[in-house]
Image (tube, coloured by chain):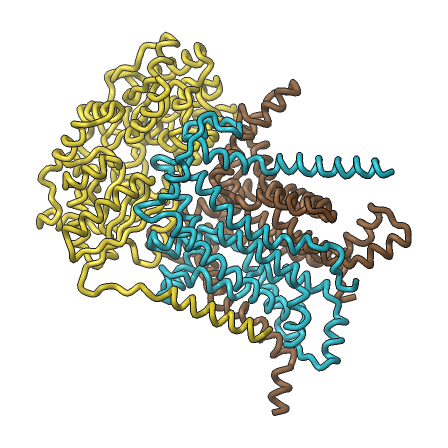
Chain colours: A yellow, B brown, C cyan
């Protein structure tokens, strides 16, 4: 018996040591490690273009990894801890956290390794820090908007949103839809709401560029009076209390944008990051409903829009990389090659390269067309010279607290003024 | 040679030879991470920036002023106190129910074990949400009885119950262990009791329970520890909401460590909880002297 | 008398079946979801019969990602899981024997250490553990996923210890008189008599390991190495779209191996309950 167990143990150890072999690297070739998050479509298409690239560059081999969103960041954090971040990696708006690991593209742009001929300055700027360092190249343009169900607006007798509608119009529409249809006027309480609603609301007040939720350097708050938040919080809480917006329980039933109450036909509006719009447009179109995109409401008709064009995500070169130039070269190809983007099909967002974008818009689906038009519209809005495309590390904590405060106001446990103070204090605390 | 033999058969040698796999694994793979996390608990280590400077006891001091931590402590205790007894009673009941000698029992036991095989998958989270949704199964049943619907996930006092129910629902591993324990009880005991004219209930109290007590102790301790560590249900279903009403301690640790980037703080929280859990486990161990019947020691 | 017994048997079966149905309902819903379209799943209807039968979820799901099909993922999971389960079973029995039957110095200390390993949340241990394997140069291999399982798992060590308590010490004594050493007692007496406990270990550990995704996520780097547990999560991306149909289809398939293991080993637990007693 003992012998047999021992033999089994030995056999197992042998298999283990076999499994640990086979990670030899070819010495002459450049091996780039790359990773991204996304869906099945994205994985398939990205791997396809990687193979294209390897064919064109026989000395480059790309070892790729892909994960779902949450897993990607768990993995990234372990790699940060062990200084082995992928050569080319994908980052969204939360990149200040990883700033220590990002190798700026400045020198590669100067030397021409990264081709920016057909990328406008405005679109390079969306992935720059306030000192003008090029953090990465954006995979796609993005901005926030309010998606709405045209028929539900008509049924409730509410005028359709204009480009300069206000928060009062918004709240009014939500209430009327609730009264006329019994459905939520405005749904969605996802993380989009904090940036699209709360943070935008601050930027809309005062002169252009005077206020922002956080300051440009991300070292503190970008506005002084916490009470500037109060009317917005009051409005959100009132809508929840009146049943015109989902309460905490209803909100929990939303797992992602695809089963938002707008999509299931139980709400008239919702917040969206516009790159998600084509998906929900198509779902609703199949059921014979038409969705449209409205701009974010303003504090006053002739006030600031508060909207900015942002980057949905970008590709960066890591400081841990031994082949930074080769990595930058790949990124340049990924964003600029029309062949590559014909395969990718703008699945990550609206491409920043003018030629690529033109060739894609030529055969856009109706939903994509609405998105393209919307992004061009927002592009015409006046924006401050300096904008902050970053969100500070620790913002998630503020968002979580802020959401709870709104719920507490809706339940009458605290007042909107108190909630504004508490949110402000929580946000300040992350800089200490 | 004799000396060598004496050494080899010495209790200390035998003990260490057999315990070697654990000791090796503990020293190599568990001890260092544990000590590291203890060290982190005195620093402001954050996963993004990697720098860790010593901050003394301030993480621990902060715990006592952190409303969410204090709230999560209460919620976790409530979860443990309700879910563990329920789950164990249920597992024992079903295991006992399924000791009948019948071909069908194999099928039945599979039926009851399946829920434990799906774990905390997204699919199950979705259906669980759906069952307790505003227009979900439970509320339509309530409606059928003329009762008003309950907003399970909208009320912070109620939101914990769907999670508790889900944990009870996955009672399979405890049931299997109980079943194995029941199998070990010698038939002769029952036969002797039959001759004494004991009824079914009496047999259960006088024979089954005492013989099973080491296994009950085991399940009690393990389920208590794992209930303290419960994470998946809250993570996939409620994300801690509403208003932190389901913010279990392990979920809060996760949020602090990975979402909010306060690894140092998360570590200090974990160590405080380790002490709390150790005390509770110790109390259970000490109490076991009074109610656990051990064949080997008697 | 006879009819009464029949009725009570019938009631028993009815009760157990009806209740069992409630228990598996969520699982059945998942399986039926694998034949529904995305929209129907998200509507959240609790019906088990799909309104529109969709048969393509299994084929789209099985196709996997970028040319790597679920066959690869299943093979990887099967390999890691079976070896780790074997390791857990053997090493835990060894350690349990030492801790429950041998009086050696430091026994209490090691027992406490063992219980303590279960009390820190994985989230805070994860990164330091990863760094150890990284320094050993073993990340991106299966070693970190398998080797620790050959060092005993606290949950099962303690379980086996409790079962050993049920094995009468007279058996040890008798064997000793027959000239058996403490090593021999383990091989000849304890290990064979531990069968029910070992079977539960196999059933539970197999499932846990199969379901585990944190480990594979941290230590595996290439999509070809991924396990089923990671691959299923690839369908769900909170930042873009989720293919629920395909995910449910693959989740349902992923139940089959764990369920088979259960069926195979469960037989031994049911067979002759109450007949194979030690003293009987």
Instruction: Tell me if A373 is positioned left or right of B104 in this view.
Output: left
Q: Position of residue B11 (x, y in %)?
A: 65, 78
Q: Among all residues in the image, which is located at the extreme top? A: A157
Q: Position of residue B40 (x, y in %)?
A: 44, 57
Q: Quadrant of the N terminus of chain A?
A: bottom right
Q: Nearer the viewer, residue C110 or A397?
A: C110
Q: Position of residue B288 (x, y in %)?
A: 73, 57
In the figure, B34 relative to A66: above or below?
below
Tell me the quarter of the picture where residue A289 sits: top left
Q: Among all residues in the image, which is located at the extreme front? A: C2
Q: Nearer the viewer, residue A408 or B169?
A: B169
In the figure, C160 relative to C181: above or below?
above
Residue B58 appears in the picture as rendered: no
Identify the residue at image location x=59%, y=50%: C263
Q: Nearer the viewer, residue C8 or C210?
A: C8
Q: Among all residues in the image, which is located at the extreme right? A: B196
Q: Position of residue B15 (x, y in %)?
A: 62, 74
Residue C29 appears in the picture as rendered: yes
Instruction: Tell me if B277 is positioned left or right of C257 in this view.
Output: right
Tell me the quarter of the picture where residue B85 sits: top right
Instruction: Tell me if A143 is positioned left or right of C58 in this view.
Output: left
In this figure, what is the number of numbered marks? 0
Identify the residue at image location x=37%, y=45%: A432
Q: Among all residues in the image, which is located at the extreme bottom? A: B1
């Amino acid at each position: 018996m003992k012998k047999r167990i021992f033999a089994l143990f030995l056999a197992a150890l042998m298999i283990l040591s076999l499994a640990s072999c086979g990670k030899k690297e070819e010495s002459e070739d450049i091996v780039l490690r790359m990773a991204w998050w996304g869906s099945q479509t994205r994985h398939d298409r990205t791997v396809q273009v990687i193979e294209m690239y390897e064919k064109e560059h026989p000395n480059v081999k790309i070892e790729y990894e892909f994960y779902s969103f949450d897993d990607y960041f768990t993995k990234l954090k372990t790699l940060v801890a062990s200084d082995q971040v992928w050569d080319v990696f994908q980052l969204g708006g939360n990149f200040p956290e990883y700033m220590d690991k990002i190798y700026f593209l400045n020198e590669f742009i100067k030397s021409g390794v990264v081709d920016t001929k057909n990328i406008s300055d405005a679109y390079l700027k969306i992935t720059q820090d306030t000192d003008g360092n090029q953090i990465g190249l954006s995979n796609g343009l993005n901005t926030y908007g309010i998606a709405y169900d045209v028929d539900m607006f008509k049924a409730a007798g509410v005028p359709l949103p204009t480009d300069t509608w206000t928060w009062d119009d918004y709240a009014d529409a939500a209430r009327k839809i609730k009264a006329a249809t019994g459905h939520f006027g405005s749904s969605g309480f996802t993380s989009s709401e904090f940036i699209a609603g709360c943070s935008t609301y601050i930027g809309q007040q005062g002169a252009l560029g005077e206020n922002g939720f956080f300051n440009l350097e991300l070292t503190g708050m970008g506005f002084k009076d916490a009470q500037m938040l109060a009317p917005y919080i009051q409005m959100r809480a009132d809508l929840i209390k009146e049943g015109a917006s989902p309460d905490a329980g209803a909100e929990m039933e939303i797992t992602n944008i695809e089963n938002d109450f707008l999509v299931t036909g139980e709400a008239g509006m919702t917040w969206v990051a516009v790159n998600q719009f084509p998906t929900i447009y198509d779902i609703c179109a199949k059921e014979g409903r038409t969705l449209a995109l409205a701009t974010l409401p303003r504090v006053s008709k002739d006030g600031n829009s508060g909207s900015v064009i942002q980057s949905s995500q970008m590709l960066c070169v890591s400081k841990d990389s031994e082949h930074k130039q080769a990595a930058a070269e790949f990124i340049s190809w990924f964003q600029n090659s029309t062949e590559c983007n014909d395969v990718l099909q703008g699945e990550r967002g609206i491409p920043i390269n003018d030629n690529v974008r033109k060739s894609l818009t030529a055969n856009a689906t109706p939903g994509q067309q609405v998105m393209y038009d919307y992004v061009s519209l927002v592009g015409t809005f006046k924006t401050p010279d300096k904008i902050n495309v970053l969100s500070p590390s620790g913002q998630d904590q503020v968002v979580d607290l802020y959401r709870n405060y709104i719920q507490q106001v809706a339940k009458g446990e605290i007042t909107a003024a108190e909630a504004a103070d508490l949110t402000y204090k929580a946000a300040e605390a992350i800089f200490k | 040679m004799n000396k060598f033999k004496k050494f080899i058969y010495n209790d200390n040698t035998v003990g260490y030879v057999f315990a070697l796999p654990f000791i090796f694994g503990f020293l190599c793979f568990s001890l260092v991470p544990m000590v590291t996390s203890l060290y982190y608990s005195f620093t402001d280590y954050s996963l993004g920036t990697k720098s860790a400077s010593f901050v003394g006891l301030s993480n621990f001091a902060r715990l006592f002023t952190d409303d969410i931590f204090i709230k999560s402590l209460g919620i976790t205790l409530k979860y443990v106190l309700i879910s563990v007894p329920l789950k164990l009673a249920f597992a024992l009941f079903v295991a006992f129910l399924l000791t009948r000698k019948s071909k069908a029992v194999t099928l039945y036991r599979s039926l009851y074990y399946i829920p434990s095989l799906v774990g905390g998958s997204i699919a199950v989270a979705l259906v669980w949400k759906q069952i307790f949704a505003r227009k979900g199964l439970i509320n339509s049943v309530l409606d059928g009885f003329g009762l008003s619907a309950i907003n399970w996930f909208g009320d912070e006092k109620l939101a914990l119950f769907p999670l508790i129910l889900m944990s009870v629902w996955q009672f399979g591993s405890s049931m299997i262990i109980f079943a194995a324990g029941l199998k070990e009880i010698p038939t002769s005991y029952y036969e002797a009791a039959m001759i004494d004219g004991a009824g079914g209930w009496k047999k259960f109290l006088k024979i089954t329970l005492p013989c099973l007590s080491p296994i009950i102790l085991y399940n009690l301790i393990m389920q208590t520890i794992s209930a303290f560590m419960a994470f998946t249900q809250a993570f996939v279903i409620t994300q801690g909401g509403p208003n932190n009403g389901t913010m279990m301690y392990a979920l809060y640790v996760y949020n602090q460590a990975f979402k909010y980037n306060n690894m140092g703080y998360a570590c200090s929280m974990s160590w405080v909880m380790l002490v709390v859990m150790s005390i509770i486990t110790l109390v259970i161990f000490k109490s076991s002297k009074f109610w656990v019947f051990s064949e080997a020691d008697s | 008398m006879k009819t009464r017994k029949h009725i009570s048997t019938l009631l028993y079966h009815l009760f157990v079946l009806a209740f069992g149905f409630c228990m598996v309902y969520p699982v059945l819903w998942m399986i039926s979801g694998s034949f529904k379209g995305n929209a129907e799943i998200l509507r959240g209807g609790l019906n088990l019969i799909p309104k529109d039968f969709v048969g393509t979820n299994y084929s789209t799901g099985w196709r996997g990602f970028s040319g790597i099909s679920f066959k690869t993922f299943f093979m990887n999971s099967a390999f890691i899981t079976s070896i780790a389960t074997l390791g857990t079973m053997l090493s835990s029995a060894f350690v349990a024997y030492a801790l429950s039957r041998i009086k050696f110095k430091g026994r209490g200390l090691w027992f406490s250490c063992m219980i303590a390993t279960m009390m820190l949340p994985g989230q805070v241990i994860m990164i330091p553990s990863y760094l150890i394997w990284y320094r050993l140069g073993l990340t991106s291999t299966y070693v970190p996923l398998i080797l620790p399982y050959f060092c005993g798992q606290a949950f099962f060590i303690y379980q086996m210890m409790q079962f050993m308590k049920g094995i009468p010490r007279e058996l040890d004594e008798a064997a000793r008189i027959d000239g058996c050493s403490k090593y021999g007692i383990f091989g000849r007496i304890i290990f064979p008599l531990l069968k029910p406990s070992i079977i539960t270990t196999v059933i539970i550990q197999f499932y846990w390991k199969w379901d585990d995704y944190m480990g594979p996520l941290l230590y595996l780097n290439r999509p070809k190495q991924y396990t089923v547990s990671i691959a299923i999560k690839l369908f769900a991306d909170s930042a873009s779209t989720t293919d629920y149909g395909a995910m449910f289809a693959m989740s349902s398939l992923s139940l089959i191996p764990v369920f088979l293991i259960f069926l195979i080993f469960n037989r031994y637990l049911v067979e002759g309950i109450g007949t194979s007693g030690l003293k009987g």
